[in-house]
Image: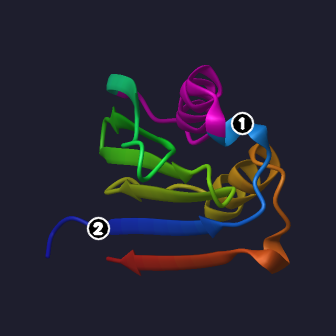
Amino acid sequence: MQTKRYHIICDLKNCNEKIKDKQALREFLEGLVKILNMTILEGPIVTDGLPENPGLSAVVIIDYSDISVHSFTKYDEALIDIFSCKEFNKEIAIDYCLKFFGVDKEKSRIKQVWWG
């Protein structure tokens, strides 16, 4: 493979109220893109989940791939997916996610995949 791949998946529990707020999710995505020195090509797009699966889904298309958030408000959980073919600072990305949603790292599941 010619193109490198960098991927972080954050499974966050006991999130703060921001997971229920469309504008907060927009600000989260815009802020994360900025601190990772990337460029937004499209979005953020934020939409409501179905009544039987309450929450929000949000995505932003960036210059090298995408970042998405899916919140499950019934359980105060959020799943964040950061994928890029451009290398980025893993710790800055993870810390930003944890701080924004008010979650301890010890109570989170974080998976990192680095190919290339």
User: Which residue occupies 31% across, 35% down?
Assistant: 61
Q: Which residue is mark 1?
A: 18
User: Which residue occupies 59% across, 69% down?
Assistant: 11
Question: Which amino acid, by three-letter code, is at mark 2?
Answer: Lys
Question: Which amino acid, by three-letter code, is at mark 1?
Answer: Lys
Left or right for 19, reference 106: left
Q: Quadrant of residue 111?
A: bottom right
Left or right for 55, reference 31: left
User: Can the viewer see residue 46?
Assistant: yes
- Circle 2 packing at 10 Å, graded few (<14), some (14-19), many (20+), is few
- Magenta range: 20-40
Q: Position of residue 51 (x, y in %)?
A: 42, 42
Answer with mark 2 or mark 1, whichever residue precedes in sequence: 2
Placement of 10 over or under 40, stated as above or below = below
* Helix, strand or loop for disc 1: helix
Residue 102 among magenta residues: no
Q: Position of residue 27 (x, y in %)?
A: 62, 25
Q: Which residue is mark 2?
A: 4
* Helix, strand or loop for disc 2: loop
